[in-house]
Amino acid sequence: MRRRAVPRDIEDKVGAFVPGPRVEIAGAAEGPLAGLDFAVKDLFDVAGAGTGYGNPDWARTHAPAAATAPVVLSLLQAGASLRGKTKTVELAYGLTGENVWQGTPINPAAPDRFPGGSSCGSAAATAAGLVDFALGSDTGGSVRIPASYCGLFGIRPSWGAVNLTGACPLGPSFDTAGWFAARASILRRVGEVLLPGGGEGALGPLLKVQEAWVNAVPQTATALVPALAGAEKVLGPALSVHIAPESLDQLFEHFRAAQAEEAWASLGSWIEAVKPGFGPGVGERFAAAKATDPARAAAARAFRDVFRTRIRALLAGGAVLAYPTSPIPAPHLNASAESQQAIRERTMGVTAIAGLAGLCEVTIPGAKVDGAPVGLSLAAAPGRDRALLAVAEKVAAVLHLPV
């Protein structure tokens, strides 16, 4: 296996990998990803290794995996070499990246700020140059937000596009397997291995989602204007659209209710039986999930059907949505719990667009605000993942970002 020239003390300082013995597997000698190293979020199974899901009680009550998740096998068979499993927020239920049991990874792009979650370790490992790319999962923004916070390219694929067998669930009708890269071409190359064929046709026009730009703080919206102009050079002048007359707050509330119902259905039996210890905020979110009113969840699912139909009709001809991935940069490590929750709600009103509609979404490291990264998101209709990755690579070239 090719070893990256990164001293172990630097790796330890970043804190991206799960503590303990490193899970490493050499990739195939030849293949489209030969010579690349990758890491895997610790909710994907690797045969013979434990899947800790960010929580010591989960690790204690689950035997080592009997088989490797197909998505990981695909990467190994394509020639990429596994460098280790990365930290995640407990049971993937959080957006800051905090893990009180294993330690919160450093955000290499802004060390005084959170890395973003729940795929925090995968983002940190990629941003620090410890690996060429890293696999994460995205239910409510857990690849897109850490990518934005850490200055990376990241993708949430179309729902159902990438095999999630052998991955711990959170909200199965929202869960996706996404990935991070520091270079746009590597993001695309991984997609050529993991994504189904088809949908490569031309995309356009570009649609500027007004609600999301207004939702961003003025500094973020202003900083991302040049990135939007770069996207316009590839896709043509942006047209302004409104897609959520109900408000982004309502999108968040519907997403939260539908996701919470699934989170409790997926994990509630284990939580009730084991009564695990949780870090700040996680236990409270699961308690709220348990208490979700079934009628409220049913209304959320009905809204999702309406919203999905609306957005897919808008994008059916190849249009691409453009908006700030996160309304503000990553919160500071000393941000209060109240401030973190306010940011979470403001952020998830935007991430819910792709989540509710099942879209593919790529975030591009578009700008910095107060020295911290913020991303520009491009989202397209389900099944247009490969075309969207190609567009993102072209936009990156226009913006002189790493290609």
Image (spheres, grey):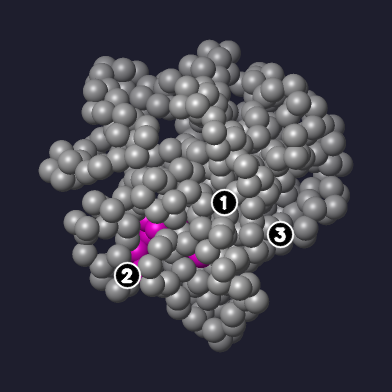
- How crowded is the residue under tag 1: few (<14 C-alpha within 10 Å), some, or many (20+)? many
Q: Which numbered marker is on residue 49? A: 2
Instruction: Give the residue pinned by disc 3.
Output: 183
Residue 125 lies in quadrant = bottom right
- How crowded is the residue under tag 3: few (<14 C-alpha within 10 Å), some, or many (20+)? some
Mark 2 touches mark 3? (CB < 8 Å): no
| Main secondary structure found in the magenta portion | loop
Q: CA distance from mark 1 to mark 3?
A: 20 Å
At horizontal 31% and vertical 50% (from top left) the residue drawn is 55
Amino acid type assigned to the residue bearing label 2 in the image = Ala
The front one of 137 and 296 is: 137
Magenta region: 39-46
The front one of 247 and 111 is: 111
Q: Which numbered marker is on residue 106? A: 1
Q: Does the rendering let one see residue 363?
A: no
- The secondary element bearing badge 1 is classed as loop
Which image quarter is the C terminus in?
bottom right
Amino acid type assigned to the residue bearing label 1 in the image = Ile
Amino acid type assigned to the residue bearing label 3 in the image = Arg
